[in-house]
Amino acid sequence: MIQIKGTLFAFYTTITVAAIIFGVLWATKSGKIVPHIRRIAGLDAIEEAIGRATEMGRPVHYTMGWGPLTTSDSPQTFASFSVLTYVTSLVAKYDAELIVTMMSPQAFPLVQELVRTSFMAAGKADMFKEGTVRFLSEAQFAYAAGVIGIFHRDKVAANLMFGYFMAESLIFAEAASQAGAIQIAGTGSMAQTPFFVAACDYTLLGEELYASGAYLSQDVNQLGSIAGQDVVKLATMLFILCGAVLATIGNPWLSNLLKK
Amino acid sequence: MRREIPLIITFVVGITLLSSYFFSGTIPGTTWVLAKVATDITGWGIIVTAFAAGLASVNLIRIHAEKIARKRQDWINSVALVVSLAVFFVVGVYVKHYPKNISMRTFSQNIFDNIYSPYGAAMFAILGFYVASASYRAFRARSFEASLLLGAAVLMMLGSAPIGVLLWNQFPIISGWLLNVVNSTGQRGINIGLAIGAFATAMRLLIGLDRGHLGSGE
């Protein structure tokens, strides 16, 4: 195999970052590091939202937006799976009603299985029905129209949005607000974050979405990986600082290295 | 094995596609060209997606067929959906197989241009009203953070609208500074965190440490 020109630096960065993350993960698993994730208000509020929906006798709506599985945005979908597992377990605990709407046909069978097994794990297999996970449409605005219809017809009391979103984000947030739902959102899509901040009760910012699985499950593998991310972030900051200093004094060494 | 097989497939496919970004040539010990293997895997993905779309459509039809059968609230909308789905499906398949049939192609194009597209445009247009109502709620100065948001928004509007320049010619400079310095700095910081988070999630999935997508087990 031959190295493709211009990918050498990216290749070594990938190896280094992976080594750091797995190194910290190993240290966490062996008990040398005990990671702690700061409080994330949006995730803490999920139980309150589901409890409110139960008291009102109205459903909880969950969407993961576009739900891509094969693009660079797909890690957001996988992060959303962790939140959905947690949401399903709470819905089962409180005997509430869950409606998961889907736009991605690729992720649809996965989500059906995930929700079904989560209900089974909670000992409430009968709570999973054909209409619990609903595929609406692969077309962006047809899906948005379908979701608005559900908000108003079923009078959802809680709207949870975690995953990759585009222009439909504000349509969902405002329509659910008009339906009187408490809203919690989290996305890695920078262009949609301001809409969620403006319209939702709680919003997860940036990488908080990726930390949600670890935060909710307290799984040592995920906690270790989050701690590893922090080490990588620190290294990245130092790298940026070095780059700024070198660029200021006119030394092109680092910018040349990035092009290799 | 129900969990192990998907994990093995994820690992093999993930490593192959990742390697194809960095390397070219044949896979060591084989005559398989890495780029071709990666292209084939992507093609398999499209086939799997087609099957998944079929499954999803079955779900859609079952839910709405039940709604029609039991005459639940707004069941007439379900009739419209099922009829539209059937018409689009039949016309789409026909046009794909008989592309020389001009009248059918025109009909297909017409239902897309004159029914589907206006509905999509109408939904997109609703965004304009939603932006206004969301801004009104967000910009009420109820807290220090909301007041900051309001102040920044007012400066940005004055910097962009012609009346701002008429009032004080420094408004565009202030709004430019807010956009290019304050906003860009924050966005880049969040983007770096997002990229590292996405990478760590991908690595956990690749080696099977994150199994959330496989369900809770039975």
Image: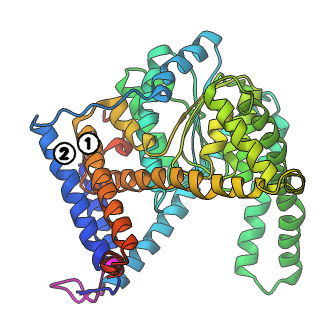
Rendered image: mark on residue A251: none
- Mark 2 is surrounded, within 10 Å at the Cα level, by few (under 14), some (14 to 19) or many (20 or more) other residues, namely many
Identify which residue is drawn at 75% across, 65% down: B90
| Quadrant for the C terminus of chain A in the image | bottom left
Q: State the SS at label 2.
A: helix
Q: Amino acid at mark 2?
A: Leu
The answer to which of A174 and A101 lies nearer the viewer is: A174
Which picture quadrant has residue B176?
A: bottom right
Please determine whether, in this image, residue B176 is positioned above or below residue B39: above
Identify the element where label 1 is drawn: helix
Residue A143 x, y percent position in the rendering: 70, 48
Q: Chain of mark 2?
A: A
Res. A12 image quadrant:
bottom left
Query: According to the image, label 2 marks what residue?
Result: A25
Work out how far the residue at label 2 is from the one at label 1, CA to CA, in angstroms.
8 Å
Counting from the top left corner in percent of width and height, residue A86 is at: 42, 29
Q: Disc number at residue A227? A: 1
Would residue A11 be visible to someone looking at this image?
yes
Q: Is residue A257 left or right of residue B57?
A: left
Image side of residue A81 versus residue B4, left or right: right
Asked if labels 1 and 2 touch by Cβ distance under 8 angstroms, the answer is: yes
Earlier residue among tags 2 and 1: 2
Residue at 48 percent of width and 41 percent of height: A112
Q: Residue visible at 81% across and 49% down?
A: B158
Q: Amino acid at mark 1?
A: Ala
Subunit bearing disc 1: A
* Discs 2/1, front: 1
- Along the line of sight, the residue nearer the viewer: A74 or A85: A74
In magenta segment, residue B22:
yes
Q: Which residues are magenta?
A: B20-33
